[in-house]
Structure formats: C-alpha cells, structure tokens
Amino acid sequence: MIAQGSWHDDWAGLHVAVLGLGKSGFSVADTLCELGANVTVFAQSASAQHSELLAVIGANLVLSDSVEAL
C-alpha cells in the first residue's frame, strides 16, 4: 500500500478497503470516493440505505458474515 501524506494528496486511482460500516465506515468511504479513490467496503451486513448510498457514491460493497470470505 502507498501511504498518503494528507487528504490534499492525489488519491485518484488508489484502491482502498474500508472494513465495516459502523460509526465511521460510511463516512470514510464517502470521503475517499470524493477524493477519487477506488473504494471497496467489506462488511458483515449493511442496511438497505447504506447499500443504496454506497452505490450512489461509487463504492463497491462486499457482504459476508465470515472473515475468511473477505
């Protein structure tokens, strides 16, 4: 993984995984998408609203109830 210095850096094309949709997971995914990163969210579950919003912001969602499947 390439470490980024700040949110002012060029995030375009960087592939980023967000683990979970808890208190901060969606906000992190949203911000990273706005910065141009290719975002995949891995979560055990997601509300219909979160699933819909992730599609709208351009993030991928991988649902699994098993860590091994992630």
Image (cartoon, helix red, strand yellow):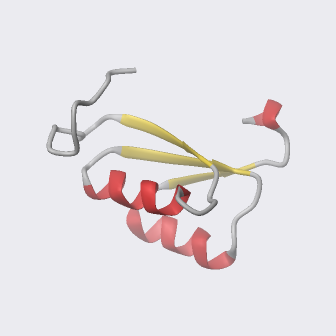
In this rendering, is residue 8 above or below 58?
above
Residue drawn at x 69%, y 65% is: 46
Q: Position of residue 37 (x, y in %)?
A: 32, 44
Which quadrant is home to the N terminus? Answer: top left
Which residue extends farthest top?
1
In this rendering, is residue 10 above or below 45?
above
The front one of 50 and 13 is 50
Q: How many circles with numbers are drawn on the protein? A: 0
Which quadrant is home to the C terminus? Answer: top right
Which residue extends farthest right?
66
Q: Position of residue 22 (x, y in %)?
A: 64, 60
Which residue extends farthest bottom?
49
Q: Is residue 59 left or right of residue 34?
A: right
Q: Is residue 65 left or right of residue 35?
A: right
Q: Quadrant of residue 2?
A: top left
Q: Is residue 7 left or right of residue 68?
A: left
Q: Position of residue 67 (x, y in %)?
A: 80, 36
Residue drawn at x 14%, y 44% is: 8
Residue drawn at x 51%, y 62% is: 26
In this rendering, is residue 18 above or below 28?
above
Q: Is residue 59 left or right of residue 35?
A: right
Q: Position of residue 68 (x, y in %)?
A: 81, 30
Q: Quadrant of residue 29?
A: bottom left
